[in-house]
Image (cartoon, helix red, strand yellow):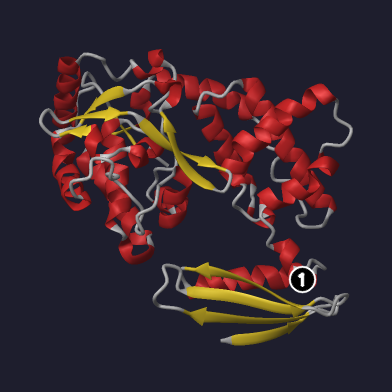
Amino acid sequence: MADKTNVPVGVRLSTDIEYRPDRPTAYRARVRWTDPTSRRRLSLSEGKDSEEKAQEWLQAIIEAAESGLSPSLATMKLTEYGEANMDLALRGLELKTLDPYLAGWRMRVVPALGHLAVRMITNGVVDRTVQNWIADERSRSTVKNTIAVLVRVMEQAVRDGIIKVNPARVTGWQKLYKQVEDELQDPRALALPDWETLTAPAEALVAASHDQYRGWGDVVVFAACTAARIGEVSGCRIGDVGTNKWIWTVRRQTTPVPGGLTDTGTKGKRARKVPVVEEIRPLVAQRVLSAGPNPDARLSTGPRGGRISTAVLRDATHGDDVVAKLGYEHLRRIAGHGSLTTTQRYLHPDVHKITAAGAALSVHLSVLRAPRSLPTPIVMTR
């Protein structure tokens, strides 16, 4: 499949899509052009999991070229653009302001958004990212400085003609602190009423993923039934799950870092114990069996054995669209906080109490309508 498109700036684009059935992203979209100054032949390509997405990628490049942008600039990732233009974006700032801005860029913006092309960052993407920072219990000043540096970099992208409107100029984020505090005090506000209501979106996420990978649904169900973060589920090793008493010792989590994902200790560096309720024990037992005897093997992985993050799960399953269509767009994760007092609202350090809490959750899952007095609601991850 090939096409040629004339653009006003005198650059002739040649585009094609190659189908490669042996690859996870089977459709490779490619664009070629000749640089008008150097006369060098240049090209860019990106793998997609459907022909429709490959066509969308090519169309975005064509539209950018028609507005005068080179394909390389139109597809530039935020990390690369920020590194190349940070001095320009932060010009005029006092020295005492630079450090917190650069820390916000390095520690929060790049891990959360750095992999996205500048042109792909929307108001919705920024809104969800800011909400995640707040849910992670970042201070108001930390979030403010992080948003500020993102605003400045994206404003430079506006001046460069890469985007027309700065999507980082979000408003009302301060009000989210009150909302998050209310949800932490009353997690039942986000509760799903029964087992069927939990498994329905999990099945929908599997159906929406490439090759309908069953592991995505297992991750969601396991996270919901253990009140854990997706990163903590990804960090779980076979040796962390005691199948004699069915208790998971949460010791580590997978977190984004520039260039990929890595495993670190849990928030606050504290291990905690979580009951593995009866409903998910067959799921866990099957994964333990599949992983083999190595205690350091991961309980949950992506389809190619890699680490999982919230962003990886969301992108692989088109999670935002799926939960919105099911009417669950209000759901979000709240568990696994670094504050011990927050965690203790729904988890107890005593093993007997942990086991009892797990049993109570099983009762909650097994009835059509659970009484209000039952503890430990199910909290979905989005």
Left or right, 174 with reference to 298 = right
Determine the image quadrant of residue 109.
top right
Residue drawn at (40%, 47%), measured in percent from left and top? 308
x and y percent of residue 297 in the render?
Answer: 28, 45
x and y percent of residue 328 in the render?
Answer: 39, 43
Left or right, 112 with reference to 240 = right
Residue furthest toward the front?
294
Nearest the eye: 103 or 133:
103
Q: In what element is the residue under mark 1?
A: helix
Q: Name the residue under label 1.
A: 65
Residue drawn at (27%, 48%), measured in percent from left and top? 218
Establish if 118 lies above or below 50: above
Establish if 73 lies above or below 279: below
Residue furthest toward the left?
244
Residue drawn at (62%, 29%), measured in percent from left and top? 173
Establish if 117 lies above or below 277: below
Residue 368 visible in this rendered orientation of the protein: no
Residue 113 visible in this rendered orientation of the protein: yes
Locate the N terminus by quadrant. bottom right
x and y percent of residue 352 in the render?
Answer: 15, 16
Establish if 333 lies above or below 62: above
